[in-house]
Image (spheres, rainbow, N blue to C red):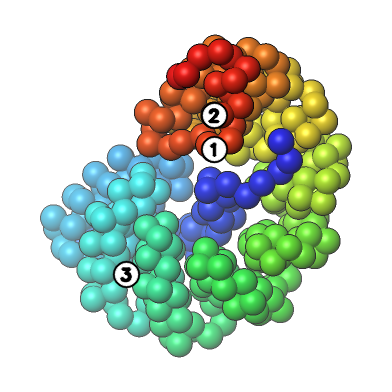
């Protein structure tokens, strides 16, 4: 049960990449006072993560006068809710109304990245940098898209550029850490995540990424320490529970591993990696019926355990399924 990259690793990038440029709200622009008032209300709701209320306020502003600021703000609100198609629609309208806004392009690029449309994301961030070559977050977000594509050298180059422009941003270090992990350069990854945490001690994702790098080097105690700190900051960090469980499993502390996988599933009952890993923990604890239950839960989610594991489980459990 050694550390392994799993599909949910992609979530870390989304958590690291900056969402907004500047104070976190779109620029107002001009229009009737009432339209601007609704935009201000939307910005306030958005900054407090009240996305439904923000959408309602921006929509009222748009009823009065269509502005790039209102489309931009509503698009970000939809994106933060995971309603990416609606977000792209609004952000595209914002771009059409204000084609010289680098910020809108990079926000739309961020959304495309979450939709796994990495080439479109890269195109938008590149356009943002053509408009404003000093927009450090466009480098960060383009680097994150490159990392998702597995183009780690390009990702590292973009994050390095962002660090040169503003060495006090935590995001570029956290994202470059991921690219270094992708290349197997774990010491460099650890150095970058350590720097990110120095800048922002509450950067839970950087702690998890550093833990993953330690875990990949076989330094499970250090990995567990980082996962502990991350979970203190965010007790609902599902990936941290699963990775800490894997670290405990590597130490043959299967009861502790089991507890972490179970906690992950309490937070997200559809987290396939937790079922996969918990089935293995049950196997080592000789709780074969429970292992089969997790195998079946995994199948219901559309995934399969490895054939060798299933063969061994059939033998030791004395049952076929």
Image quadrant containing the N terminus: top right
Q: Nearer the viewer, residue 57 or 158?
A: 158
- Badge 2: residue crowd in 10 Å (few <14, some 14–19, many ≥20): some
Residue 298 sits above or below residue 175 on the image: above
Residue that carries the numbered disc 3 in the rendered image: 29
Dividing the picture into quadrants, the one containing residue 152 is bottom right
Q: Residue at x 44, y 23 (%)?
A: 296
Residue that carries the numbered disc 2 in the rendered image: 310
- Badge 3: residue crowd in 10 Å (few <14, some 14–19, many ≥20): few
- Is 236 left, or right, of 207 in this rendering? left
Residue 31 sits above or below residue 56 on the image: below
- Is 20 left, or right, of 89 in this rendering? right
Q: Check disc 1 and report its element: helix, strand or loop.
A: loop
Q: Residue at x 46, y 42 (%)?
A: 48
Any mark on residue 306, and which? 1
Q: State yes or no: discs 2 and 1 in contact (Cβ < 8 Å).
A: yes
Residue 188's x, y, as percent?
80, 65
């Amino acid at each position: 049960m050694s550390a392994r990259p799993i599909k949910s690793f992609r979530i870390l990038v989304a958590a690291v990449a900056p969402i907004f440029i500047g104070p976190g709200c779109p620029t107002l622009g001009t229009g009737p006072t009432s339209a601007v008032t609704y935009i201000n209300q939307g910005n306030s709701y958005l900054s407090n993560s009240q996305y439904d209320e923000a959408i309602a306020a921006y929509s009222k502003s748009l009823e009065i006068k269509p502005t790039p600021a209102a489309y931009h703000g509503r698009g970000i609100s939809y994106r933060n809710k995971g309603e990416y198609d609606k977000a792209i629609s609004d952000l595209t309208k914002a771009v059409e109304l204000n084609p010289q806004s680098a910020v809108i392009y990079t926000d739309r690029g961020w959304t495309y990245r979450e939709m796994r449309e990495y080439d479109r994301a890269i195109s938008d961030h590149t356009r943002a940098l053509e408009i404003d070559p000093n927009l450090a977050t466009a480098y960060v977000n383009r680097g994150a898209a490159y990392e998702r594509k597995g183009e780690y050298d390009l990702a590292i180059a973009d994050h390095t550029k962002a660090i040169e422009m503003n060495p006090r941003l935590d995001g570029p270090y956290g994202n470059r850490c991921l690219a270094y992990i992708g290349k197997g350069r774990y010491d460099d990854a650890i150095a970058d995540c350590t720097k990110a945490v120095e800048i922002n001690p509450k950067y839970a994702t950087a702690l998890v990424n550093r833990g993953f790098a330690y875990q990949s080097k076989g330094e499970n105690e250090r990995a567990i320490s980082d996962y502990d700190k991350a979970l203190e900051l965010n007790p609902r960090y599902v990936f941290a529970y699963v990775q800490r469980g894997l670290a405990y499993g590597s130490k043959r502390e299967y009861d502790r591993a089991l507890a972490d996988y179970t906690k992950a599933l309490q937070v997200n009952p559809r987290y396939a990696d937790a079922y996969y890993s918990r089935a293995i923990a049950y196997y080592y604890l000789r709780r074969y019926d429970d292992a089969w239950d997790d195998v079946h839960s995994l199948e219901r989610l559309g995934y399969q355990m490895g054939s060798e594991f299933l063969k061994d489980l059939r033998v030791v459990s004395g049952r076929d399924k």
